[in-house]
Amino acid sequence: MADQEGARGDGAAAAAMSVGRDPGPQAAPGPEAGDISSSSSSSTMMDKESCLLKKMEISVSEAEKRTGKNAVNMQEIYTVYLIETRTIDNQNEGQSSVPDSLWRRYSEFELLRNYLVVAYSFIVVPPLPEKRAEFVWHKLSADNMDPDFVERRRIGLENFLLRVASHPILSQDKILYFFLTQENGWKEAVNETGFQTKADSRLKALNATYRVKNPDRRFTELKHYGDELQSVISHLLRVRARVADRLYGVYKVHGNYGRVFSEWSAIEKEMGDGLQSAGHHMDVYAASIDDILEEEEHYADQLKEYLFFAEALRSVCRKHELQQYDLEMAALDLTSKKQQREELATGTLRTFSLKGMTSKLFGQETPEQREAKLKVLEQQIVDGEELVKTKNLECEDFVKDAWTDIERFKEQKNSDLKEALISYAVMQISMCKKVGIWNALPERVVEADSITTFKGEVDNYLGRTHLQGYGERD
């Protein structure tokens, strides 16, 4: 995953974790822009060596605040992000060309991702970073214009582009290439695909969830896993925010010790230097929490990415439910048409119906009328059989392609979270070593019995034994 320090370099390493860097637009192209249907189940998972990141370096290098008028002609302040791309020349031993750059708003990133979700419904599309700060503690601002938040979002947007550009299928899309290289005209290209009209409504998806009769057990379990993953990470981030609040307060209180020790040293002759040194180390201890929590925030952002990945997983599951529901409805309609044909052919009605009551009241249909209806029904049955066959093939292809991408996502998730949690543990161990402030104090301080006694009391307060235990295990 992209580390917050050295955003571009670490972001590229993050994207390369699951899929290597890959060829750019010169590689074999994917589906044409606008050809959404051809980008789904008919596609097979392409080789990792064909992705865009192999031939193009991509970074979101900076953010800038701007002022302009919105859609309703009102003045607004917004943030734009500078995307830099550089084509890698394989013929000159990996040398890069002069970079191209353009500015994009967050809403444009949203438009790109919405298109990808519709056009590639069988893929776990990487999520965008949060639009507004969530799980904040008191030192962090919830303002989406806050410089620290904007910087974290810049890194998240870069990570999004690197993940998409390293995906073996998403990276082939021409709309993605237009987004990266054409400042003007790419929105028109997106709208021409008509992806908005192909997007499934929330009501339809909810209806399919409750009415599908034969759901695939694997997707049901995956959807449940996505719910649990989101719940667990949300709880973890809430707990972390509360801990950060309290930890920040505890550390800052030690700044008072530093002031008191400094004042005390002024009235002590023999112990003055030692007390002054102790006060200095207390000040260092109090100030260290800022760097610690800032680094922690980077790991929290990595967890947030998988919080949003959980929704991407559920999106794939919902699409499968919709396809399964459409298949079942088509099969049910076909069965109904066949029953109507049989009833017309034999002249008997198997079930009570309005048609049966009408026949009793107004008499039976003439042979000519029955023959005409039979012809219509025969054609409808042929069309229905073809529709069921098509829907069935679509479901089979969707399941095959979706499960291939889900397996790819699982490998990426396991690798990313393992690395993030190990790095977090290493950071905590390093922090515990740094706060062993008494190890740095001059020996003459601990020679005085009074200071030794006080040192023991402070050690108990700081939990020095617990903290050093981490260092010893390291």
Image (cartoon, rainbow, N blue to C red):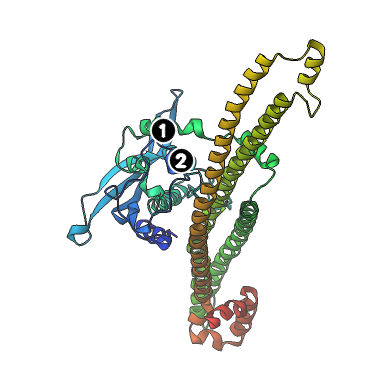
How many numbered circles are shown?
Answer: 2
Amino acid type indicated by mark 2 = Ala
Residue density around tag 2, few if under 14, some if 14–19, many if 20 or more, within 10 Å: many
Left or right of residue 373: residue 441: left
* Image location of residue 281, percent across then percent down: 50, 73
Indicate which disc residue 193 carries. 1
Front one among 340 and 55: 340
Indicate which disc residue 54 carries. none
Front one among 226 and 48: 48
Image quarter hosting the N terminus: bottom left
* Image location of residue 200, percent across then percent down: 56, 35
Q: CA distance from mark 1 to mark 2?
A: 9 Å
Front one among 101 and 90: 90
SS of the residue at dot 2?
A: helix
Amino acid type indicated by mark 1 = Thr
Residue density around tag 1, few if under 14, some if 14–19, many if 20 or more, within 10 Å: some
Report whether residue 266 is seen. no
Q: Are marks 1 and 2 in contact (CB under 8 Å)?
A: yes
Left or right of residue 38: residue 235: right
Q: Which residue is mark 2?
A: 119
